[in-house]
Image (tube, grey):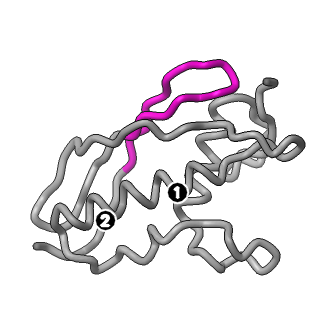
Amino acid sequence: MRAPRGLDRSTFKIVEGWPYVESLLDDLLATRKGGRVLRRGYGSDVPAFIDAPGNSATVLRLCAEVAVAADQIRDLETGDALVRFRQAREVSADAKGNYTLAFVFDYLADGTEQIVDRRFYTGASA
């Protein structure tokens, strides 16, 4: 499988390989489902977690949304999956609803394991 290539969403420079896949993941997590007119299924429900209770059920739902979003990352030409979600780990959480989660992916283009840390803010406490 060749390395995917496209535009980075923040710099608009051409990026290739894992950095491109990581920018796709960030875009999917920041885009609400139904927010793109021609791609209604694109995105995730992660933006809906603002004001969600800051508890373990919310963390579990966040992890599930990341797994579903990762499944949408596909090669534009072949439709082949580029990543496989393997697991999530809670790195830190506080009473204000701030979570840092580590996600482990298999990057299928070269067979490596990639770990991505992301912060989420629900804005609510348990």
Circle 2: element type: strand
Q: Residue at x 31, y 46 (%)?
A: 101
Circle 1: element type: helix
Q: Is residue 74 left or right of residue 108?
A: right
- The one of 91 and 82 positioned closer to us in this rendering: 82
Count neighbours of disc 1 (C-alpha within 10 A) and say few if under 14, some if 14 to 19, many if 20 or more.
some
In the image, residue 47 lies at what x, y percent?
Answer: 46, 72
Q: Quadrant of the C terminus?
A: bottom left
- 13 inside magenta stretch: no
Which amino acid is tagged 2?
Tyr
| Most frequent secondary structure within the magenta stretch | strand
The CA span between labels 1 and 2 is: 19 Å
The image quarter containing residue 82 is top right
Q: Residue at x 49, y 34 (%)?
A: 105
Q: Residue at x 67, y 48 (%)?
A: 73
Query: Which tag is nearer the camera, tag 1 or tag 2?
Result: 1
In the image, residue 9 lies at what x, y percent?
Answer: 69, 52
Q: Which residue matches tag 2?
A: 121
Indicate whether 114 appears above or below 57. above
Q: Provide the residue span drawn in magenta.
A: 103-118
Count neighbours of disc 2 (C-alpha within 10 A) and say few if under 14, some if 14 to 19, many if 20 or more.
some
In the image, residue 59 lies at what x, y percent?
Answer: 26, 59
Q: Which mark is residue 68?
A: 1
Indicate whether 86 appears above or below 120. above
The image quarter containing residue 15 is top right
